[in-house]
Amino acid sequence: MEWTRERRYRRLEEVSQEELFELERRVNHSLWRQTFHIQPKTGLLNDPNGFSYFNGEYHLFYQWFPLGPVHGLKYWYHVKSKDLVNWEDAGIGIKPGDYFDSHGAYSGSAIEHEGKLYLLYTGNTRDNDWGRNPYQCLAVMNREGEISKLPPVISEVPEGYTDHFRDPKIWKKDDQFFMVIGAQRSNETGCIVLYQSNDLLSWSFKGEMKTELPPFGYMWECPDYFELGDRGILVFSPQGIAPDGDLYQNIYQSGYLIGNPLDVENGLFSHGKFQELDRGFDFYAPQTMEDQKGRRILVGWVGLPEIDYPTDADGWAHCLSLPRELTEKNGKLLQNPVKELQELRKNEKGIEDILQDEGESYVGFTGTTYELTTEFQNHDAKTFGIEFRTGKNEKTIITYDTIEKKLVLDRTHSGISFATSYGTVRKCALDSKKIKLQMFVDVSSVEIFVNDGEEVFTSRIFPSQESQGIRFFATGGKVSFQAKKWELQ
Ligand code: FRU
């Protein structure tokens, strides 16, 4: 079936119950449904939106196209949780269709104000010639969880920028509200603009956020600014960055600048180099929030635009990442899975061994959904690591190359292949005697946290259900390691 414009912009109300049931049936038969990740019940999920803590619960919305695995008329879908682990379905959050969001309720953020949760998002509209006209829109959620739209707060793109103007992220400082918006300058370079408000309703344009980057891609999506201690951090997803050695291998990137706190009066932000947030194949458009415990937590989209995924054939695509707590250390963000995820652990297994030029599997170390932590040390091997989701002709490999001092994720033989024109190996420099890997494996994904959050590799993989093996290995010498594994339920 061809995804014509008409099909992509049908509203849910225009679709028959039979069609929806048939789609749900296909999705439910998919072999790749995840077990502990947020995923769409049908259709396509992309960016996390409106991530917040309100009225005793975490709220998380995501970009959703209900009718198939493509980008079309976007809704905000709402899930909520008391613990960041067990998520409750809260239904559609924002329905597009008004003059200011006729062609999609695009990405945005949330903030609590006067006992309500304010949702700021981009209303995507298209004119008869399919020209874009973005609005920055406001909706309010009360304590009962009812969401109502208010009139848009910004209806014009300021002079000097194109209609690629979206994804407001809001924060509050000293009784004032600020928001950053992802933008494209008229000369087709990406940037971020800044607005200020006292009441969330009327906003004044404060100009561009003045970073020290040279021209860096053609569009910056999903900006997010926050402070950790005395550091200012700007997260964004630039498009149009060419690969550079091991860096920027995916179609689009997401990363951060870290520096002095933003000077909101003149938009000045002085910072260090752009650093990628994730080293894996599938990660984009992350959003953060500060929770009631003062933690800065990040969730990303485990997927990328413009890439076909094997689940497309089953009528759905993508999931969200596990929530990660961010801390700052020596000019770098550390990302660790929130500790609440330990609630999922069942059936602990442990081993300790020394491997010398060999690979070994262990009783109880198998599965499709588990957490596995491994600490490798005392090595003189050339390489060592773990093969997982191994089967007849399949394996996904995480290797530490002690000569090159790089960690390497290889999904060449992970199962059904996809996006291969972007390569099947991802590498990142890592110079460390001790290598600690904390892996979360779900039916069709893996998230690998390295050395207590120094690096993360997030990727989809599509092995067959039978590929459940785990094998630890060393080549060209020996390594000792300890590992623990839990089933996750
Ligand atoms: C990023 C993005 C955003 C936009 C949304 C639309 O993936 O393109 O810039 O608001 O997705 O779904």
Image (spheres, helix red, strand yellow):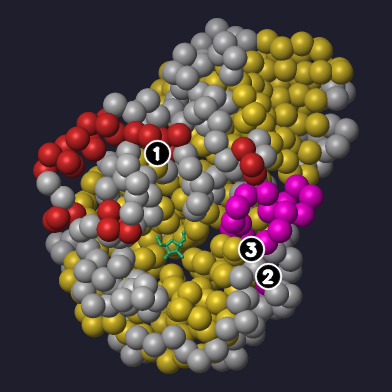
**Labels 3 and 2: the sequence-earlier one:** 2
**Residue 14: which quarter of the image?**
bottom left
Question: Within the magenta stretch, is there residue 245?
Answer: yes
Cα gap from disc 1 to disc 2, whole angstroms: 32 Å
In percent of width and height, residue 220 lies at 56, 69
**Residue 85: which quarter of the image?**
top left
- The residue lying toward the viewer, choosing from 316 and 488, is 316
Residue 246, can we see it? Answer: yes
Q: Check disc 1 and report its element: helix, strand or loop.
A: helix
Q: Residues within 10 Å of mark 3 (few under 14, many from 20)?
A: some
In the image, what residue occupies the spot 80% across and 25% down? Answer: 383
In percent of width and height, residue 140 lies at 23, 72
In the image, what residue occupies the spot 79% across and 50% down? Answer: 245
Provide the residue span drawn in magenta.
240-262
**Label 1 sits on residue:** 312
Q: Which mark is residue 216?
A: 2
Q: Which mark is residue 240?
A: 3
Q: Check disc 2 and report its element: helix, strand or loop.
A: loop
Residue type indicated by callout 1: Asp
